Amino acid sequence: MTKIAFIGVGNMGAGMAANQAKAQHQVAAFDLSPAALAKAVEAGCHAADSVAAAVGDAEVVITMLPAGKHVREVYADQVLPNAAKGALLIDCSTIDVESARDVAAQATEAGFRFADAPVSGGIMAADAGTLAFMVGCAEADFAAVEAALAPMARVVLRAGEAGAGQAAKICNNMLLGVSMLGTCEAFALAEKLGLEAERFFEIASKSSGQCWSLTSYCPWPGPVPAAPSNRGYEGGFLTALMLKDLKLSQDAAAKVGASTPMGAQAGALYAMFDGLGHGGKDFSAVLQLLRGKLDDLA
Ligand code: NAD
């Protein structure tokens, strides 16, 4: 049994903390939202009164917070001054690479082991304990990080040193945004050319256009039964979260001078789709924007 402090038990953190409790670890949870905290308690965690109280005697501290500024503040003001000596600190939030590297440097300076470990997989994977973790940490610390993440994970991969987990996450999601838009455009063009969507799917899935967005997460309802397109684009990976990750990738690209014109275009399209009020739909629903069929979205 490991003593774990879990800070941020919202949509993702709730299931993740519950899986740590299920694995017989002692989980002290804290969240600014009393409702979120109550849910974590129902799932077997203990409620802490503050971040400081949660981390005081924890061997592992896990944070799952909205954005870089929350992570910076929580670490600088509460985790680093109060965590027990020798604690392993793991931030699973999706944040900018610069914040991840800064927090890692502060944690190391204060004598802690730190990993950035953002996840791939949404709320269902968090609940099921099947998240993919992309880890940035010292090589020597990886075995401990992997063991700490195991109850929440399908796979834990080390991307490199501090910040590399966040870099892997935003590069992956920029690729995903671009590939989804390409897939949607191809379906929209096929439709206008009088080519049946099912025929196009069958052919492209066996040809060089094959990609995950097409064959695992098809935006056109029908060919991939498990895809959100078959349930009105509800659930899945929200457009608003894809937009957040595309903004992170574009901010990072601007900082390091990387050329990412397709990522920029994807960001503009998802911003438009979000601005039209569809931020709560799965990101594959952007197909209906490209088809000119936004009215079909509830
Ligand atoms: P969420 O808003 O549901 O949860 C964040 C929680 O953090 C909230 O409950 C909030 O009250 C809490 N919080 C904020 N500031 C705090 C503080 N100072 N102290 C304690 N608690 C605080 O968000 P989420 O959907 O769970 O996402 C969390 C992170 O995971 C984000 O970085 C997001 O980008 C990433 N992510 C989300 C998904 C998804 O499908 N939802 C998928 C992959 C990654």
Image (cartoon, rainbow, N blue to C red):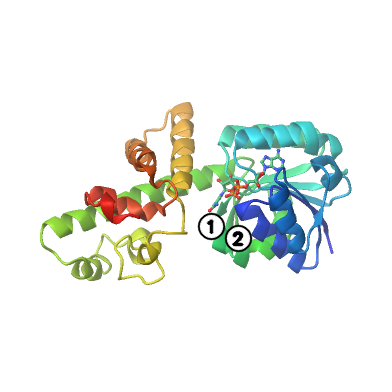
Residue type indicated by callout 1 = Gly
- Mark 2: C-beta under 8 Å from nearest atom of ligand 1: yes
Q: Position of residue 182 (x, y in %)?
A: 28, 51
Task: Please tell me whether residue 179 is drawn above or below residue 155 in the rendered image.
Answer: above
> How many labels sit on residues?
2
On screen, residue 235 above or below 260? below
Q: Give the camera-side residue of 210 and 286.
A: 286
Name the disc covering residue 126, or none.
2
Identified at 73% across, 52% down, the residue is: 37
Q: Nearer the viewer, residue 17 or 157?
A: 17
Q: State the residue at coordinates (20%, 54%).
A: 188
CB contact under 8 Å: marks 1 and 2? yes
- Considering every residue shown, the one lying at the far left of the view is 193
Where is 13 relative to 51, above or below? below
Locate residue 192 relative to residue 44 in the image: left or right.
left
SS category of the residue bearing label 2:
helix
